[in-house]
Amino acid sequence: MDMLKRFLNETEQRALLRAARQSSDPLAQRDYHWMRLMIETGARVSELASFTAAQAEAALASGWLVVAPAQRKANSQGKRRGHEYLVTEPVRTSLLALLALQREESAALEPDAPVPLIWGRDGKALSVRSYQVRIKAWAQAGGLAGGVSPHWLRHTRGVNIINRSRAANPMKVAQLALGHVSAASTAIYTQLARDEYVQALQATAGGRMPKKAARRAAGVVAEVTGTHEVAPC
């Protein structure tokens, strides 16, 4: 699958979350809130798998979900940098819900161990593999195409920021929100937004847009976003 499509558009996000939310099963509710948490923060699945209840409680108190360097992915130089995700209202709602669900399952958790925010049936922190399996199941239940993975939700966060932000430089907002050291890592989300724009114009024309027109449309978006790449036709 094309790397540039590894995200969920607005309709797909709603379908994925709706599939889990409409079930009353506690595990489905758990899944709904961790998927929503990933969409609203852009956290990596490895970070999510390491989050503890204490981290969530501290985030609710401070307004920032603090991720320690040890919980983060190493950069190209092998170094790890800590990061903070803003606790917006959707993030706050999901953290509260996950904590409430976690307390209901406290009897199954391992004694004398850090309490995971998101747990598996064995009482341990949910494994990365389990996140992958669960999101594929919910994607299928929501009628989405195959191949959806937790990392798609990180890309989705970047695309959402580019599409929704009213800031003068939405790409910088996405860079800071996701913790990218280099703006080059964030540039893909501008490309994704531009591709959706061109596709939308093609659809209104009732057929494929001529290459020259597509290049002109891409140029308009480049002026708005501050980039100068030409969208592929």
Image: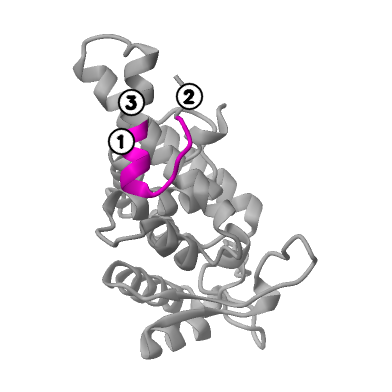
Q: Quick one: 214 or 62, which is closer to the camera?
A: 214
Its colouring scheme is one colour
Q: Quick one: 91 or 139, which is closer to the camera?
A: 91
Which sits earlier in the primary sequence, circle 1 or circle 2?
1
Establish if 103 lies above or below 218: below
Q: Is residue 116 left or right of residue 81?
A: left
Circles 1 and 2: CB distance less than 8 Å?
no
Are there few (<14), some (14-19), or many (20+) residues within 10 Å of tag 1?
some
Name the spot of residue 47 as percent of width and height, x first.
Answer: 59, 66
Give the magenta range.
219-230
Residue for badge 3:
216
Residue 176, magenta (yes or no): no
Q: Is residue 12 visible?
A: no
What is the CA distance from the residue labelled 3 to the residue labelled 1?
6 Å
Circles 3 and 1: CB distance less than 8 Å?
yes
Q: Which is closer to the viewer, label 3 or label 2?
A: 3
Residue for badge 1:
220
Establish if 229 lies above or below 45: above
Establish if 201 lies above or below 83: above
Which sits earlier in the primary sequence, circle 3 or circle 2?
3
Label 2 sits on what residue type?
A: Pro
Which quadrant of the structure image shows residue 111?
A: bottom right
SS at badge 3? helix
Question: Looking at the rendered structure, which numbered label has been put on residue 232?
Answer: 2
Residue drawn at x 37%, y 36% is 194
SS at badge 1? helix
Label 3 sits on what residue type?
A: Arg
Q: Quick one: 172 or 215, which is closer to the camera?
A: 215
Residue drawn at x 29%, y 45% is 18
Q: Can residue 50 be seen in this view?
A: yes
